[in-house]
Amino acid sequence: MMSYTLAEPYQSYEEIKKSRFMVYVAPINSIQQAQNIIANKSDHTATHNCWAWKLGQQYRFNDDGEPTGTAGKPILNAIEGQHCDNVLAIVTRWFGGIKLGTGGLSRAYGGGTARCLQQAPLIAIVPHLCCELHCYYNEWPILENKLHTLDAIILNQTYDAEGTALRLSVPQQTFEFLQQWINNLTRGRVCLKKIIN
């Protein structure tokens, strides 16, 4: 199943039985970044700032005073239900005087997050492999052009008397093609090696 993240932050607003809900979603790359966004985006004039984030196998959620299980978990479920990863969602509620009940709260928080993510600009998360190689200077310009066409990322590059050593991040689905292409370019002299983290 393909996973998605956000191309950029996005927010939406809803009013449910006089309570106002603002949903803010953002891409994240680390737990620290998620914590910083939560600290900066929580509105202290609001009744509740409930949130959830997912980062690979790690996730956290918070009900911020709403009944247990009615806010943070439904937000996380909405993130997962939209097949999103590396995403943070904060739902800020200003209480309007009418209680929604536990089911209504779950629908408001989870449904609002799902609708926001459906409207937000999503991009597919493409799994990458880390690999390395060494090539001669005369091979480098040809290889560099090929790397751009395959959306490979140069993580590190060093030079020596014979050529250049590269550490790359390569989309997983193009690794075998690139490996064969480099083998052909260098007549079998260079092998693209996977680095196991």
Image (spheres, rainbow, N blue to C red):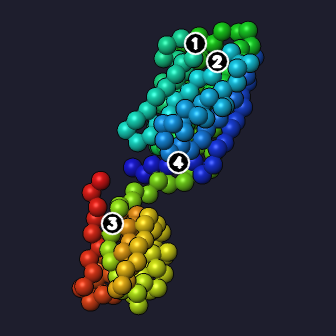
Return the residue nearer the eye: 64 or 106: 64
- Report, in whole angstroms, how far the alpha carbon at label 2 lies from the one at label 3: 46 Å
Mark 3 vs mark 1, foreground winner is 3
Determine contact: label 2, label 1, CB under 8 Å. Answer: yes
Amino acid type, label 4? Thr
Amino acid type, label 2? His
Give the residue at mark 3: 131
- Report, in whole angstroms, how far the alpha carbon at label 2 lies from the one at label 1: 7 Å
Amino acid type, label 1? Gly
Q: For the point 34% across and 82% down, which residue is it? A: 135
Mark linked to residue 65:
1
- Where is residue 46 drawn, in percent x and y? 71, 19
Determine contact: label 1, label 4, CB under 8 Å. Answer: no
Q: Secondary structure at mark 4?
A: strand
Give the residue at mark 4: 5
Chain-order first, disc 1 or disc 4: 4
Mark 3 vs mark 4, foreground winner is 3
Q: Is residue 29 left or right of residue 9?
A: left
Badge 3 local density, few (<14 within 10 Å), some, or many (20+)? some
- Where is residue 20 drawn, in percent x and y? 73, 22
Amino acid type, label 3? Cys
